[in-house]
Amino acid sequence: MTEMKGERVRSLVDQAREVRDRAYAPYSKFPVGAALYCEDGSVILGCNVENASYPLGLCAERAAVATAVTEGHHRFLAIAVVGSGPRPLTPCGGCRQVLSEFGDLWIIAASGTDGTIRQYRLSQLLPESFGEADLL
Ligand code: THU
């Protein structure tokens, strides 16, 4: 896959930043937004959804994947993620594994406080990952 165009990257980051406002994060006070870019051009959004039973909280990336699959999308090109801290937010380990189910996406990690954006391939962040082929 060729590098994501700058305009597309900026648009995905903007959408992730907007949906971050809908996060339900009363415990961590760390809202996260994600914008999942599908092969057909659709953009599916997700935010983190926490729970008083802390481990049941859902990350923004996984919320976006669940909504996308529910809406019939399985082919993803990229995901933009915006957290609340200065460091561009790369998906947590569990989300990397969940995303890897759907291929070697571009991961667009954006700072929650300034304009810093970093771009990775998922395989850089989760090398030698466990997948379907390992079950055969
Ligand atoms: N969080 C995400 O939504 N995505 C990540 O990749 C890292 C962490 C959420 C989980 C929790 O609601 C809050 O950020 C603090 O960890």
Image: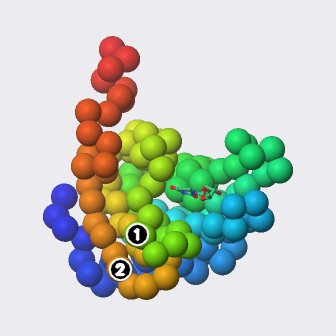
Colour treatment of the image: rainbow
Crowd rating for badge 1 (residues with CA inside 10 Å; few <14, some 14–19, many 20+): many
Crowd rating for badge 2 (residues with CA inside 10 Å; few <14, some 14–19, many 20+): few
Residue under label 1: 88
Place residue 41 in its image quadrant: bottom left
**Which amino acid, by three-letter code, is at mark 2?**
Thr
Q: Is mark 1 within 8 Å of ligand 1?
A: no
Determine the residue positioned at 63% across, 67% down.
30
Report the disc number at residue 32: none
Between residues 82 and 3, which one lies in front from this camera angle?
A: 82
Position of residue 46 relative to residue 85, above or below, is above
Q: Are the residues tagged 1 and 2 within 8 Å (C-beta)? A: yes
Residue under label 2: 116
**Visible in this render: residue 107?**
yes
Q: Give residue 44's position: percent from left, percent from top.
A: 53, 65
**Which amino acid, by three-letter code, is at mark 1?**
Pro
Which is nearer the N-term, disc 1 or disc 2?
A: 1
